Amino acid sequence: MDNFNYKKSLGQNFLQDINVLTNIVKSANIKDNSLTIEVGPGSGNLTKEIAKVSNQVLCYEIDTRLEMILDKNLVEYKNIDIIFDDFLKRDIRSDIEKYEYDNLYLVANLPYYITTPIIQKVIDSNLPFKQLTIMIQKEVGERFNAKPGTKEYNSLTAYLNYYFDLKKEFIVSRNCFIPKPNVDSIVISLVKKENLLPLKNPKHFDKLLRDSFKFKRKTLKNNLKNYDLEKIEKVLKEHNFTLTTRAEEIPMEVFVSISNSLN
Ligand code: SAM
């Protein structure tokens, strides 16, 4: 990798520390008969570790300059397929159709510039992922875990907490990467909740959350002007909130009730 021209625009910070790589894979809890998806294999350092424990690995890498490097580094592993394309443009469901597996995972050191779109895509795919184990920017990870009433709590926090049990696994220093990024990282795992709260319309729930948090300093009344405010007020009252509350105070469960009341 000595002469490789890393592209900052593609979030190319490659993880060098073998202990961190093996710990990520340990945190992923990969069980028998598994298919694991990796977004952004880079030079294949994490891919190798995944391939040691997962029956099959499917990677998506946008940068075709990495093809020869990956071929060379992963030559010993026969259970890895790589699609050279933008993960965000793929139909994951049809890409994994040909595989037979009981347990589906995603493990990735994500390109940080598209952390949210990748997670959103994975959720929208509605595929039965058992666990997502991702390395992301530390500050973003803190936000995912934030509680209502704190300034880090946002629409994505509420959204993720609807679908997953989140766990902070460990912090990774910026010194473990080449090139060295300006921020530290965190590995988090997201385990699909067994019993999701009934939700009439997931797309509506997503939109409601985005609209509620649109202007952080505004109240729900102002952010949700185009909604049926009477219905919303009724649900809020039942939970001891009002229309003049800000979205960051509202627990995910209350957003679920509001969304259901509007459908
Ligand atoms: N897995 C390697 C590691 O852990 O060292 C590399 C991780 S690096 C943070 C992110 C990788 O994602 C890079 O290889 C980059 O080229 C790739 N990438 C960036 N955008 C992508 C996209 N839209 N689809 C697929 N891969 C992408």
Image: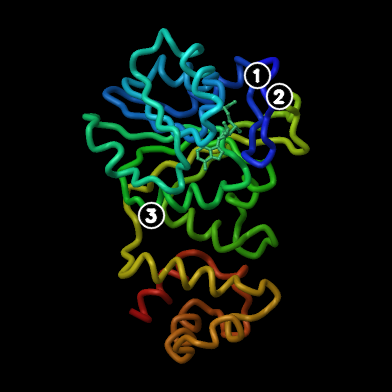
Q: Nearer the viewer, mark 3 or mark 2?
A: 2
Say what amino acid the circle numbered 2 marks: Ile
Q: How is the image coloured?
A: rainbow
Q: Please state, as top left, top right, bottom left or bottom right, where the C terminus lies in the image.
A: bottom left
Q: Is residue 83 above or below residue 236?
A: above
Is ligand 1 closer than 8 angstroms to the Cβ of mark 1?
A: yes
Q: Residue at x 35, y 50 (%)?
A: 125
**Residue lying furthest right:** 182
Q: Secondary structure at mark 3?
A: helix
Say what amino acid the circle numbered 3 marks: Asp
Q: Secondary structure at mark 2?
A: strand
Tell me the residue that label 3 is attached to. Answer: 124
Disc 1 vs disc 3: Cβ atoms closer than 8 Å? no
Task: Give the CA separation, mark 3 to mark 2.
Answer: 32 Å
Disc 1 vs disc 2: Cβ atoms closer than 8 Å? yes
Q: Position of residue 152 (x, y in %)?
A: 67, 58
Q: Position of residue 49 (x, y in %)?
A: 48, 17
Task: Give the CA separation, mark 1 to mark 3.
Answer: 32 Å
Tell me the residue that label 2 is attached to. Answer: 178
Displayed-image quarter of ligand 1: top right
Image mark for residue 195: none
Dot 1 or dot 3, earlier in sequence: 1
Q: Is residue 185 left or right of residue 76?
A: right
Of 44 and 184, nearer the camera is: 44
Dot 1 or dot 2, earlier in sequence: 1
Q: Position of residue 251 (x, y in %)?
A: 53, 66
Q: Residue at x 66, y 30 (%)?
A: 13
Q: Is residue 37 left or right of residue 7?
A: left
Q: Is residue 171 above or below residue 219?
A: above
